[in-house]
Amino acid sequence: MRIPEPSAIRQNLLCATALGLLFLSAPFPRIQLVVHAMLVLALAPRPGAPLVGALWALAAGWTLEGSLRLYPHLGGTAWADLTLTLLAGWMAGRWPLEGLKGWLARLASLSVLHALLLHGAVRLATGPHPWGWGWFWTLLSVPVWGWLAWRLLHTGAGSGRR
Amino acid sequence: MVVRTARWGWSRTGWQRLALMLLWLGHGAWVLLGPNPGRHWTSLADALSRPSQSLASRWEHWRVSRRDAARSLTETRGENARLSAELAQLRTQAAQEAPRLAEADAAVRLLGLKQQIPLELKSARVIFSTRPATFGGLILDRGKDLGLVSDQGVLVPEGIVGRLWSVSGTQAKVLPADAPNASVAVMLMRSRATGVLQGQGSGRALIRYVSNQEVVQAGEAVLTSGLDRVFPRGLLVGYVGEVAQGDLELRVIVNLSAPLDRLSTVLLLPPQPPLEVQAPFLALEPKPQPKRGLP
């Protein structure tokens, strides 16, 4: 069974809400990282409109780095988010969703890839820095935010605009 | 057959892909540039300017070394000129002080001789020499004022000079031993044969009254015998230069050891000295060196 895509309005509204939460959750880095991963990997990718998703990913990356990230050279997170959003959108078009389990598994794998690419890009941009535990909390909470994104995006979605 | 011509320009999807590519590449380039992107341009400019900087450095180093070399050459020339002037000044000073040094040296040697002879010796300075003239002699700067009398023996560390011939108030004349009218009682060191030394001029003298039976060798020392009561026994007179057989006596030519032409200060023996005194002029026989390892 092929899952229909959500409407663009709903998706953009969800992305805007997540971006606001991302900005507001700056005092809580663990929550902020989870919201960031949810926005980049689950909410922003859209198979038919990669440019819109890329802009949301860039906004998420720059917002994250602009809030309490005192890197000497910003931009690594935004570039990693852009890459992962494009990859996730391409995967969504190439392998359409068929259920929640596949969705969660895809999000888990993308989370790992996102953590690696994020660390590498920030390392390239600013130099060596600690790994931290954000990747762990993000991976651990994949069922939560993955299920939430699934509910928000696809519940009641009938014939969404492509 | 209908041939469709493609519209000039890109579709909306193409523009979106171009924007995506530009966004991705731009962010990637921005990330790769890293902090302080200007350092890449700085490093590039440094790499490009390295040859010219190296050339300029070598040029500056060559100029500095050349300037240093020129400065050192100038300093060396100045140092040479200063040292040359100083050397000339020192030479002039040494030449001026040479006579004084010679007199001081002679005075020291005379003082040594005076301490070795247990007699009351007096010293006088030679102020003039008339030896080249016939019956010439040496003129001393002291006379009766020093208590000098005629026939006092005159000697220097190298040997005897002669005797006082005449004494005036402030000067005295020395008859040297090589004068033709001078005579000194002498003896040969080895044979102990005695004779009378008679001057022949030019630092040479002849010993008279030595028998043909005596064995005299060239180089043998000739000492005063003390029989003339002018010189005590044992003062060095000279060395035998030539020995020849005569009709009745040996003809012994003696080279006087005292440098009669280069005297500046002399010592005067007291009149009528004792016969025996220590003989400081004798060349000591070399002592046998003890062998190593033996006590």
Image: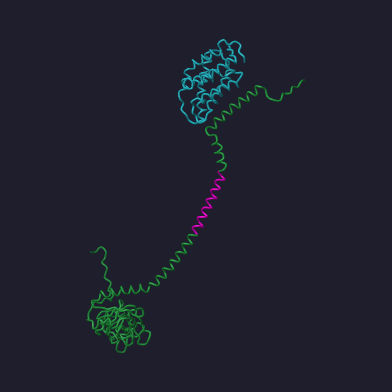
Chain colours: A cyan, B green
Q: Residue at x 53, y 34 (%)?
A: B36
In the foreground, A105 or A126: A126
In the rendered image, residue B234, in percent from the top left (x then y), is placed at 25, 79
Main SS, magenta region, reads helix
In the rendered image, residue A84, in percent from the top left (x then y), is placed at 55, 22
In the rendered image, residue B19, in percent from the top left (x then y), is placed at 62, 25
The image quadrant where one finds the N terminus of chain A is top right
Quadrant of the rendered structure where residue B244 is?
A: bottom left
Q: Residue at x 27, y 75 (%)?
A: B114
- Looking at the image, can residue B252 be seen? no
Q: Residue at x 53, y 24 (%)?
A: A63
In the foreground, B6 or B201: B6
Q: Is residue B22 above or below residue B274?
A: above
Q: Is residue A141 above or below residue B135?
A: above
Q: Which residues are magenta?
A: B50-73
Q: Residue furthest bottom?
A: B247
- Does the magenta run of residues contain B70? yes
In the foreground, B186 or B59: B59
Q: Residue at x 56, y 37 (%)?
A: B41
- Does the magenta run of residues contain A153? no
In the foreground, A131 or B188: A131
The image quadrant where one finds the C terminus of chain A is top right
Locate residue B220 relative to residue A111 in the image: left or right: left
Report the number of numbered marks. 0
Quadrant of the rendered structure where residue B152 is?
A: bottom left
- Looking at the image, can residue B127 be seen? yes
Q: Is residue A114 above or below residue B242?
A: above
In the rendered image, residue A28, in percent from the top left (x then y), is placed at 46, 21
